[in-house]
Image (cartoon, rainbow, N blue to C red):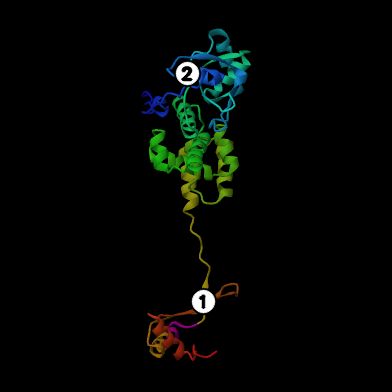
Amino acid sequence: MAARKGLGRGLGSLISDRHPTPASDQHTTPADTFARETHDGRVTDLPIDQIVRNPRQPRQTFREEALSELADSIREHGILQPLMVRTKSDGKYELIAGERRLRAAGLAGLEIVPVNLVEASDLQSLEIAIIENLQREDLNPVEEAEGYRELAAEFKLTQEEIAKRVSRSRATVANALRLLTLPDDIRAMLKEQQISTGHAKALLGLSIPQEQTLLARRIVAEDLSVRATEKIVKRTSSIPTKPRATKPDLPKDFLRDLTEKLHQHFSTSVRLAPCKTFANGKKSKGSIEIDFFSNDDLERVLSVMGIDLSED
């Protein structure tokens, strides 16, 4: 298998290079001191209870078994890569990257974890969280799409801008966002890896949500391949819809003669659509369209119809 290419810009380019303005020594907070000591890239230890989880964390699914295995590794080897955090106004620190490591550290009984403090805006924080997870292939397709949606909704970014920021193609971003139009139960199947992204994309070929859900359940029950799913979608979508039988209430010859008489009467083009009778006896409405080309022309047509605009 070919090696997976990196995402290009990486985390470094998303982090501000500006140094924080030193606070007065008499009013220095722990956050100020920590920022000055670690802004050059050095790592410091921080109590777990001082770290607040990122509310914009795109990854929501964490397998307990995998967390337990990581906790065992942390007990034996410690945390090999520091978490990434930023300073909050209340003196605590908001996690940007490393949610899985933070959870596993708690399971391992650690009270202190290594962190790297960076300057990052809300937008940069979300970008870094998404990119870090994408680089590790930690996000499931729905979480990835939800991250893109938040970038679009929260920061008013276009698909093109999102693609550039996370080093993805615009088509990749667009296709991911389309997954969010699937019914909730199908998105849950995708999150739980009961169906693949290929299955989900095939299901988008069906326009009726109920049909999408029924086929998704069939995929799981019968272990259908993506190719088999695509064939079913194609076959379902190609079933022709039988048009309802209708009968015009006016014969064609009569309709043509009447339209010509209306044209001569109004001295302008007239289109006449007759009522239609359906097989069940119900009728559709008919219509008459008369062309005019100015207000004066409209007055002329109305006059021919016997309508006098000067009357009260």
Q: Name the quadrant of the C terminus.
A: bottom right
Image vertical order of residue 189 relative to residue 100, above or below: below
Q: In 3D space, how far apart are the residues under numbered discs 2 and 1 (Cα atoms)?
A: 83 Å
Q: Secondary structure at mark 2?
A: helix
Residue, x 59% and y 42% (percent of image)? 184
Give percent across and percent down for residue 74.
56, 12
Residue at screen point 49% across, 32% down: 126
Range shown magenta: 250-255
Q: Which residue is mark 1?
A: 247
Q: Is residue 168 left or right of residue 47?
A: left
Residue under the point 52% across and 42% down = 180
- Residue type, label 2: Arg
Residue at which label 2 appears: 36
Residue 204 percent coordinates (x, y): 49, 46
In the displayed structure, 23 sits above or below 306; it is above
Residue closer to the observer: 212 or 239: 212
